[in-house]
Structure formats: C-alpha cells, structure tokens
Image (tube, rainbow, N blue to C red):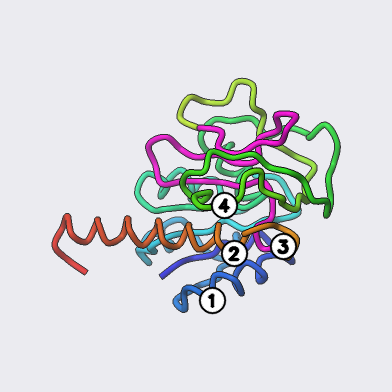
Amino acid sequence: MFVVIDNYDSFTYNLVQILGRFEKDLLVVRNDQTSVEEIAAMEPEGILISPGPSTPASAGISVPLIRALGPAVPILGVCLGHQCIGEAFGGQVVQAPEPVHGKTWEVLHDGKGVFAGLPEPLVAVRYHSLVVERAGLPSDLLVTAWTRDGLVMGLRHRRYPVEGVQFHPESMLTQAGEKLLANFLDLARKKAKNRCEEVETC
C-alpha cells in the first residue's frame, strides 16, 4: 500500500489520479487527520507528501513523519512536500527570489532516482514562493535538480530512500511527470521486495 499525505491542496488528487494508473492500493489521508504512529502501523511501501498552500511548519504531520519513517520507508515530497523534506533534515526554507505560479521552467537534474530516464533539461511547471536554500544545505541532502540560476528543484537523502521535487510532476505541462511518479513507485516496490527477502516474509 502507498499512502498520500494531503496537505489540503487542489493538486493532490491529480497526483493520486496518475499514481492510480500504476498502483491500485492507495490511501489518501489529510495531514491533520492521522498520526505518525497510525501511518507507521500501516507499514506502507511508500509515502507521497503532497503540495500545499502553507509552510512546512503548518503541514500537519508531514515533517515529523519524514523524520520518523524516512530512514526505512521510501518517501517522495512534491512542492511543499519537498520543502518538508528539506526542513526535516535540517535545511532552511526561505522566500524564493520571486514567486512563480503556473510557469514552465527548464530544470537540470542528475538522471538518478526519480529522474532516471527523464529528459535533461526537463521542462517542468512551478507553483511556489518558497525554496529550500542551497547555501548551508546539510551534508545528508544532495541537490538532484536545479534551475539554470541555481535554485534547488530536487533533493535526495544520501542514506535514506527519500526524494523531493519542487516542481509539479502531475501538471500536464511538465515533461515526463508521469514517468517520474512511476519511477518513485518502482523504487519503493524494489525496496519493499528487498526488505521482504531479508526477513523472509511477505
């Protein structure tokens, strides 16, 4: 099962619709209507932290959930979810040089993780006024995607199965967004399979 944490965003169900093309066992839970303990008890294969209109501090269980389950459970954060990953592991979320709402942008990336097999540069849609600050980023977090002027558009934890993207893969104008989400599901399933083989269960 995959869990989607809904940060009260109109884009959440666009993400769910795309995920549903590749995975039928999806549970959507709002960020203030569950707990870290309840999510942990579900033993999800993966967790997606959705976009949202607020800040990481106002995103319900999103940040504590990433801290608690990130070491073991694959997590993908989108927009606000990406910012929550930055904050969860010691990064700073700051005002972007300028707010960007519904504009396409060229995004460069490392071609690994959720970016495997995606075009580079990638044309992606941005809707945000906050960014994870690149300067002083904790050593555990690797910048995986960026704009030509250096803004962080993607993060990956160096030791945990956690990734974030600042842009919106669910947008029709984002190039290969469906592939990015499918990559996340595949990575999560592979980790779950390996975990099962290690303990000889499942």
Marks 4,3: beta carbons within 8 A = no
Q: Please, what is the three-letter code of the amino acid marked with disc 4?
A: Leu
Which of the marked residues, 3 or 1, is nearer the chain's N terminus?
1
In percent of width and height, residue 5 lies at 56, 61
Upstream in sequence: badge 4 or badge 3: 4
Instruction: Give me the disc on residue 118.
Output: 4
Q: Which residues are magenta?
A: 142-170
Answer above or below: position of 15 versus 96. below
Q: For mark 3, what is the residue?
A: 171
* Type of amino acid at the residue the image marks with label 3: Ser
Please report contact status of discs 3 and 2: CB closer than 8 Å, yes or no: no
Marks 3 and 2, Cα distance to the nearest angstrom?
A: 9 Å
Graded by Cα atoms within 10 Å as few (under 14), some (14 to 19) or many (20 or more), the crowding at tag 4 reads: some
Q: Position of residue 109 (x, y in %)?
A: 59, 40
Q: Quadrant of the N terminus?
A: bottom left
Q: Is residue 77 above or below residue 8?
A: above
Residue at image point 83% right, 45% down: 100
The amino acid sitting under disc 1 is Arg
87 left or right of 151? left
Looking at the rendered structure, the secondary structure element under dot 4 is loop
Name the front one of labels 2 and 4: 4
Q: Secondary structure at mark 3?
A: loop
The residue carrying mark 1 is 21
The circle drawn on residue 178 is: 2
Do the numbered discs 1 and 2 sit on residues whose CB atoms are within 8 Å? yes
Q: Secondary structure at mark 1?
A: loop
Give the residue at x 83% y 54%.
Answer: 102
Would residue 118 be found to the left or right of residue 173 on screen?
left
